[in-house]
Amino acid sequence: MKQESQTNFNSECDEATKLPQTFLVKSLDETSKDLERISAQDQLQWGHHQFNEQFVVTTSFGIQSAVLLHMTVLLKSIKQLKVIWIDTGYLPKETYNYAEELTKLFELDLVVAQSPISPARMEALYGRLWETGKEKDLEKYHQIRKVEPLEKTLSNLNVRCWASGVRKGQTKNRQAMTHIDYIRDRLTLRPLLNWTKKDIYYYMEKNNLPQHPLFQKGYSTVGDWHSSEAENNNSKGRSTRFGGLSEECGIHLNTK
């Protein structure tokens, strides 16, 4: 980005902090185009600059999570951002261990979002929703264990904008995403949207960031233990999730 454009954008960020925090200086589309022209680190800094304590980062402690978390601790800020982690109660043991490792390494201000319904209670009431092969049951599972816990936590923290590490190359739905948009009536920022797998790998290598333990076992993406598997001849990327029934878990879809 040219120096003049960067200066103008920084000036607009300064002006944005003077406005009510539900508004952007420019339209959503114009803001997204401006964000696309600056680095992922600067996009994250912009979000924190504009929304202050009403801005958070979300993480899954998945395969690429170390990148956005590392950027978070590099922010120029007096107070560190809160990081929201959705713990479904069904994550692999490797993910729980990785979460502990990164939380200590980055000294994260971690907020754990969990469903008020325990896994055992949910299974007693509704069965093992991920096993039926029905998309509506999988959606119900995602709503109970992921979407509702996230939304409750965002509301409790009075969040106006949340950042995630989604990338266009992950799913068909994400190919059409922009750098900033509304999800369930809140702004969501996507600093890594245009990053490739190589970008993720080289950033982690350059900054000596630890890999998720399941990466070495052939996993390119990992969520719950029952809905994730290593890549094979038939499944690559997000098609290894949810038995191929869905590529999305509902968190990044604009549905309620």
Image: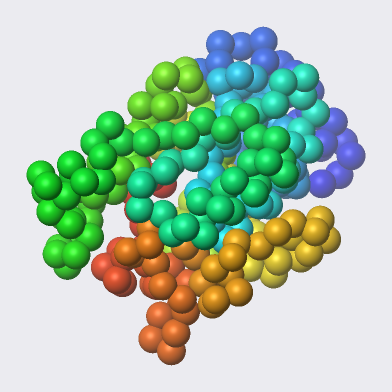
Nearest the eye: 102 or 60:
102
Q: Where in the figure is residue 65, as x and y percent of width and height?
A: 60, 52
Q: Where in the figure is residue 228, as x and y percent of width and height?
A: 39, 67
In which quarter of the view is residue 217 placed? bottom right
Residue drawn where x is 30% and y is 43% of the image: 145
Residue with the most extreme bottom position: 233
Query: In the figure, is residue 36 to the left or right of 232?
Result: right
Nearest the eye: 24 or 256:
256
Query: In the figure, is residue 172 to the left or right of 198?
Result: left
- Look at the image and tell me whether residue 81 can be seen: yes
249 up-or-down from 108: above or below: below
Residue with the most extreme left position: 125
Q: How is the image coloured?
A: rainbow
Residue drawn where x is 22% and y is 56% of the image: 138
14 up-or-down from 121: above or below: above
Q: Where in the figure is residue 118, as x and y percent of width and height?
A: 26, 40
In which quarter of the view is residue 238 placed? bottom left
137 up-or-down from 77: above or below: below
Number of labelled discs? 0
- Look at the image and tell me whether residue 184 can be seen: no
Residue drawn where x is 82% and y is 36% of the image: 6
Nearest the eye: 53 or 254:
53
Image quadrant holding the C terminus, namely top left
Residue drawn where x is 66% and y is 62% of the image: 211
Q: Where in the figure is residue 19, as x and y percent of width and height?
A: 61, 11
